[in-house]
């Protein structure tokens, strides 16, 4: 039997806990804030992947400093705050201390993963059945795990041990019986203490009697999403199959969906949850969003006239072993004043990581059998100014992410640098057709392990973001000069 008692003198009350932000999401938002012409919509899209950032900026926008109607979506909240204050508060969030205990940090990341999925499932349900509530449902869904998060940070490893022994479905009972912690009450009180507007609190109200039909529908949307995500994780998603009536206890049926809506919802929710499980690692990983330019259009309703845009951006998962590398590389990207400084500092950061021994920034002309070495580090003897890439199938010509983990004796798989264990990734495509790529290897070691692969993906995606910002700032400066 696991001992679940806890020394109350050493714990923080749940309502006094401070949630840490997702490091990858925060860094991406801060990089976007470095644009000359800040796009608050892009920053909002990034923040909506992290309940901590969403909660904190909603709290700021709804403080007594501002008058007017409550800001119940993040776009309105950031506009009310203004770009200058958004930048300052993002900096303040970066100073918030991380969770020290690795086991607790891992479970917190899993709860974040849970909240992101509830958020998007809420959005899908509302978009299909109650479109006017779509954004409110998305944000409320993102806050759905606040009770668990507060209890986790309060109890620490005690919560982790309870979770291991009793599983998630039995957690509410064990927390209430052993620690007098009611998850629903704590979630409600924690969100209220953060100044979350009443509209977004409807799904979590302790009083079942809600004032408006809209609040009732919002509750059904979000609570249905919470139940669906739990069902998927427990292998019971089939209970929502449209070939059979919904069980009487399922709140989704209270939204009075038609058989056609039921069938399409089942299909789209299954596709989304499967895709998320394949692309995001829930086991103790935060996220780095690669781009906010790409949406997946999923077939819900009339696929031609009324497609549903589901925010599902390409991401890189950040495992604990890669987080120190992420922080160092982010500092490099944030402090770089120009592209040349960025290239040099980026290679130095990759070398400091201990994952790679040789790194280079390579520029490939649109039509040439030779590539130019912009910067290189760790090569002995030092590289010349060009390398030959006559083979059209050379990884330098293909302009795509290519990571080879193992050294091969075959000459066909070797790069011009003499190794077949390497990582190459696209960084920028210039207007004249030139391509800039990042290269790294661990020669003379045998190959690249999973940590090396993760660190390279992080570095490449941060470089892509920073290069895009440099280009956008240059264009903006040119426009201002012409005026």
Image: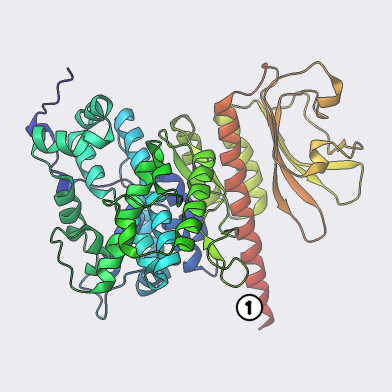
Query: Colour scheme of this structure image?
Result: rainbow
Q: Is residue 228 above or below residue 401?
A: below
**Other-residue count near label 1 (Cα within 10 Å), few / some / many at <14 / 14–19 / ≥20:** few
* Quadrant of the snapshot with the N terminus: top left
State the residue lying farthest toward the bottom: 483
The answer to whether residue 356 is above or below residue 120 is: above
Residue at 23 percent across and 64 percent down: it is 202
Q: Secondary structure at mark 1?
A: helix
Quarter of the picture containing the C terminus is: bottom right
* 186 or 360, nearer to the observer: 186
* Residue that appears at 59% across and 46% down: 461
In the image, residue 257 lies at what x, y percent? 39, 64
Question: What residue do we see at 26% from left, 30% from top?
Answer: 163
The residue at the point 49 percent across, 33 percent down is 322
The correct choice, above or below, for 95 with respect to 152 in the image is: below
Q: Quadrant of residue 389 in the image?
A: top right
- Residue 190: image x %, image y %? 18, 53
Residue 238: x and y, percent?
43, 42
Q: Work out whether residue 21 can be spotted.
A: no
Residue wearing tag 1: 480
Indicate whether 446 appears above or below 249: above
Q: Is residue 457 visible?
A: yes
Q: In the figure, residue 80 lies in which quadrant?
A: bottom left
Q: Is residue 180 left or right of residue 192?
A: left
């Amino acid at each position: 039997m696991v001992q679940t008692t806890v020394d109350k003198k050493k714990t923080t009350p749940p309502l006094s806990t401070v949630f840490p932000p997702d490091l990858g999401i925060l860094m991406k938002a801060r990089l976007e804030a470095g644009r000359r012409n800040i796009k608050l919509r892009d920053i909002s899209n990034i923040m909506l992947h992290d309940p901590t950032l969403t909660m904190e900026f909603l709290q700021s926008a709804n403080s007594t400093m501002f008058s007017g109607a409550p800001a119940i979506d993040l776009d309105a909240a950031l506009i009310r705050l203004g770009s200058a204050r958004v930048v300052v508060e993002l900096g303040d969030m970066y100073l918030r201390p991380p969770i020290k205990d690795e086991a607790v940090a891992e479970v917190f990341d899993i709860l974040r993963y849970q909240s992101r999925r509830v958020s998007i499932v809420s959005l899908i349900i509302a978009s299909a059945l109650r479109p006017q509530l779509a954004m409110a449902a998305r944000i409320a869904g993102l806050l759905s795990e606040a009770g668990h998060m507060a209890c986790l940070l309060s109890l620490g490893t005690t919560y982790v041990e309870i979770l291991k022994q009793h599983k998630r479905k039995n957690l509410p009972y064990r927390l209430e019986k052993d620690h007098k912690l009611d998850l629903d009450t704590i979630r409600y009180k924690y969100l209220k203490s953060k100044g979350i507007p009443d509209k977004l609190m409807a799904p979590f109200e302790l009083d079942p009697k809600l004032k408006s039909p809209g609040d009732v529908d919002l509750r059904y949307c979000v609570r249905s999403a919470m139940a669906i995500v739990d069902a998927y994780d427990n292998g019971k998603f089939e209970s929502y199959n449209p070939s059979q009536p919904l069980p009487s206890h399922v709140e989704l049926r209270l939204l009075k969906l038609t058989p056609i809506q039921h069938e399409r919802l089942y299909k789209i929710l299954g596709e989304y949850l499967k895709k998320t499980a394949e692309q995001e690692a829930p086991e103790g990983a935060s996220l780095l969003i690669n781009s906010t330019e790409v949406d997946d259009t999923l077939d819900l309703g009339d696929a031609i006239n009324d497609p549903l845009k589901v925010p599902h951006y390409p991401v890189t998962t950040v495992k604990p072993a890669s987080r120190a590398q992420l922080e160092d590389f982010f500092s490099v990207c944030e402090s770089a004043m120009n592209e040349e400084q960025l290239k040099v500092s980026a290679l130095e950061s990759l070398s400091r990581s201990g994952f790679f021994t040789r790194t280079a920034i390579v520029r490939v002309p649109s039509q040439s059998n030779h590539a130019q070495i912009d910067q290189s580090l760790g090569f002995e003897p030092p590289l010349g100014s060009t390398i030959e890439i006559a083979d059209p199938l050379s990884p330098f010509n293909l302009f795509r992410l290519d990571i080879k983990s193992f050294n091969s004796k075959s000459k066909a798989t070797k790069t011009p640098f003499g190794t077949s264990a390497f990582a190459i990734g696209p960084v920028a495509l210039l207007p004249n057709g030139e391509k800039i790529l990042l290269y790294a290897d661990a020669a003379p070691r045998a190959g690249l392990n999973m940590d090396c692969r993760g660190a390279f993906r992080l570095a490449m995606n941060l470089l892509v973001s920073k290069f895009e910002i440099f280009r956008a700032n240059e264009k903006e400066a040119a426009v201002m000069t012409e005026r």
